[in-house]
Amino acid sequence: MPTWCCGFPVFFDNTLKGNTMRIVIGSDHAGFPLKATVVAHIRKLGHEVEDVGSHDDQPVDFPDIAQLVTGAVADGRAERGLLVCGTGVGASIAANKVKGIRAAVCHDIHSAHQCVEHDDVNVMCIGAQIVGPWLALDLIDSYLKAEFSTDEDFRRRVEKLYKMDAER
């Protein structure tokens, strides 16, 4: 049974089901200050976290970090990925270049869970310069609690995405 929010059904469970996930996280220098808060929060939820960098506030190219995050998701070392950069946009563009990755920029709670439920997104990108720490944690909660829908329409559409990905 869905929870209702703003007249729309929300299909995520508000409790952590005891299932731990392996989450890989990366940031560029713009996302670095927020990343420590995010990593601590994900660990507090009981998930395993692999932090692939950056490890300081020195300039780094977000495509390099995106490759590290997406590599861990694509090869199965992590169930989901999280990228934190200035706006989330550059990280999303870079992540979506990798076969098998479906990345989305999420700056609102609805998108954070619906991208998983409807589109089977496996990498969420957030902009540290767009959202503050409180909203970032709410976004992460929604993203990590969401599960891909069993609805045939969504399954059919995501299967088409897989086929498009395979044709690259």
Image (cartoon, rainbow, N blue to C red):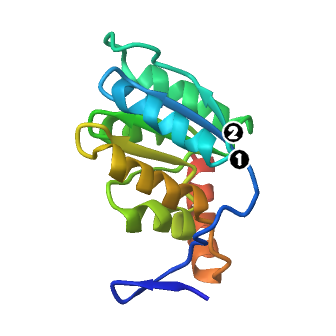
User: Of residues 28 and 101, which is closer to you in this image?
Assistant: 28
Q: Quadrant of the N terminus?
A: bottom right
- Residue 12: % across, % down: 57, 72
Tell me which residue sits at (40%, 41%) in the image. Answer: 92
Q: Is residue 73 left or right of residue 106?
A: right
Q: Which mark is residue 152?
A: none
User: Element under label 1?
Assistant: loop
Q: Quadrant of residue 150?
A: bottom right
* CB-based contact (under 8 Å), mark 2 and mark 1: yes
- Residue 98: % across, % down: 54, 37
Tell me which residue sits at (35%, 26%) in the image. Answer: 33
Residue occupied by mark 1: 21
Residue occupied by mark 2: 78
Tell me which residue sits at (65%, 82%) in the image. Answer: 152
Tell me which residue sits at (23%, 37%) in the image. Answer: 129
Is residue 100 among what the camera can see? Answer: no
Q: Amino acid at mark 2?
A: Ala
User: Of residues 124 and 157, which is closer to you in this image?
Assistant: 124
Q: Earlier in the sequence, mark 2 or mark 1?
A: 1
Q: Quadrant of residue 35?
A: top left
Q: Is residue 62 left or right of residue 77?
A: left
Q: Quadrant of the C terminus?
A: top right
How many residues crowd mark 1 within 10 Å: few (<14), some (14–19), many (20+)?
some
- Residue 45: % across, % down: 62, 49
Q: Amino acid at mark 1?
A: Met
From what the image shows, is residue 165 above or below residue 155? Answer: above
User: Element under label 2?
Assistant: loop
Q: Is residue 49 left or right of residue 3?
A: right
